[in-house]
Image: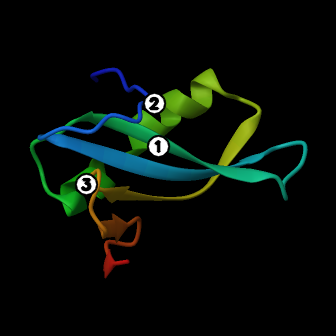
Amino acid sequence: MPGYTLIDRVGMGFIQIIVMVCQIALPDQCEEQRLQFAWQGSLTQCVMSAQPYIAQWISDHPQWAVKSYHCAYPDTRRKVDAGGRAHSA
């Protein structure tokens, strides 16, 4: 599994898994994390393939729990959520 990076830069062939995480000790304290990496598939394929990347992030950050996630192309408003539903913001 390729490594993930949390970065602000975007480029062609990149995709983001946007994960809403909450602190285990303070479940009302949540924040968004963006895992960005090179990707050659669709948003739906990203959602179906996201769990190992999210699991790696959680392994590196055990004080956080995942509340929700979706995939999106950087700098676009198109996304697909974990239920496979497409959205435009």
Mark 2: secondary structure = loop
Q: Are marks 2 and 1 in contact (CB under 8 Å)?
A: yes
Residue in the image at 66% along x and 27% along y: 61
- Circle 1 SS class: strand
Tell me the residue that label 2 is attached to: 6
Which amino acid type is shown beneath numbered disc 2? Answer: Leu
Between discs 3 and 2, the one toward the N terminus: 2
Residue 43: image x %, image y %?
22, 59
Left or right, 23 with reference to 68: right
Label 2 vs 1, first from the N-terminus: 2
Residue type for callout 3: Tyr
Residue drawn at (49%, 28%) of the image? 56
Q: Eyeballing the image, is 64 above or below 76?
A: above
Quadrant of the image occupied by residue 87: bottom left
Closest to the observer, 25 or 52: 25
Residue 12 sits in which quadrant? top left
Up-down relation of residue 89 to residue 9 (above or below) = below
The residue beneath circle 3 is 73
Q: Disc 3 to disc 2, how far (Cα)?
A: 14 Å
Q: Is residue 7 depicted above or below 77 in this figure? A: above
Q: Please tell me whether residue 83 is drawn above or below residue 54 in the rendered image.
A: below
Q: What whole-number distance in Å separates the C-alpha atoms at marks 2 and 1?
A: 6 Å
Callout 3: 10 Å neighbours few (<14), some, many (20+)?
many
**What residue is pinned by disc 1?**
34
User: How dense is the environment of label 1, judged by Cα within 10 Å: few (below 14), some, or many (20 and up)?
Assistant: many
Q: Quadrant of residue 77?
A: bottom left
Tell me which numbered mark, 1 or 3, is placed earlier along the sequence. 1
Q: Is residue 60 left or right of residue 28?
A: left
User: Which quadrant is the N terminus positioned in?
Assistant: top left
